[in-house]
Amino acid sequence: MRKSLFSALLGALASVALTFSMAMPHTASARSMHEHDSTLSQKVASQGTVEVAFAPNEGAESLVIRAIDSAHTQIRMLAYNLTSPPIVDALIAAHDQRHVEVHVIADLKANTTEDFHGVARIALNRLAAAHIDVRVISAYSLQHDKLLIIDDETTQTGSFNYTLGAAHLNSEYVMVNWNNRPLAQVFVGHFLRNYQQSVPYSTVQ
């Protein structure tokens, strides 16, 4: 009985392994895809200062706001979800009080059709009412970026969504590379790619 059960189990495992191997691409093809992907990465020399902070309640949101507050000329933001009032306040203050050029691209679904409580729409509406360039994107399954490019010189990234939940409930991290222009330029290219595929938020309200 035990031997029969063991044999049946081995047979089932073999079947699963065969199905999995048939679903995987040919080894040579997979290697070719990997080699192609590797040619697209970009290396940037380390420079400037790197600063990190964590969440919940360990300085992550404050570091994002400090990065925004440091802007003198321009802020470019890619956001998956944008609902944090303090971050929205900082963006508006940068635009209104310091005359910083602010561009925000947010994921369309996360901030409109799947914004079931309306908090993301409130945030985007506030930014738009302040005459900030607010756009949304649906070209990808998700625009999952969490990115700030400050004055084309400083870059903020990490797992941290620009939300109150990220600041006060989730395990998250924020990393800012201050004063690394070559790195910022790489991210500018990424931002511009998404900008070209986005549409003004006013067209989807």
Image (cartoon, rainbow, N blue to C red):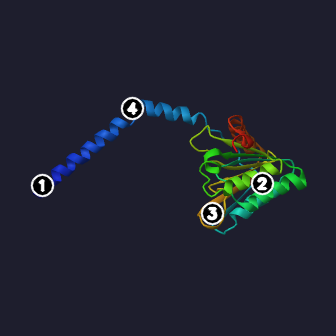
Specify which label sits upstream in the sequence, 4 or 1. Answer: 1
Task: Look at mark 2 in the image and give the residue it sits on.
Answer: 126
Task: Look at mark 3 in the image and give the residue it sits on.
Answer: 165
Task: Look at mark 1 in the image and give the residue it sits on.
Answer: 3
Tell me the CA gap for discs 1 and 2: 69 Å
Question: Which residue is farthest bottom?
Answer: 57
Tell me the CA gap for discs 4 and 3: 42 Å
Question: Residue at the location (89% across, 50% down)?
Answer: 99
* Residue type indicated by callout 3: Gly
Q: Secondary structure at mark 2?
A: helix
* Residue type indicated by callout 1: Lys
Specify which label sits upstream in the sequence, 2 or 4. Answer: 4
Determine whether, in the image, residue 179 is placed left or right of residue 30.
right
- Residue 181 position within the rendered picture, expressed as x and y whole percent measured from the top left: 78, 45
- Residue 163 position within the rendered picture, expressed as x and y whole percent measured from the top left: 66, 59
The correct choice, above or below, for 109 with respect to 23 in the image is: below
Determine whether, in the image, residue 110 is placed left or right of residue 126.
left
Tell me the CA gap for discs 1 and 3: 53 Å
Question: Which residue is farthest front?
Answer: 205
The reply to whether residue 65 is visible in this rendering is: yes
* Residue type indicated by callout 2: Arg
86, 176: nearer the viewer: 86
Task: Look at mark 4 in the image and give the residue it sits on.
Answer: 26
* Residue type indicated by callout 4: His
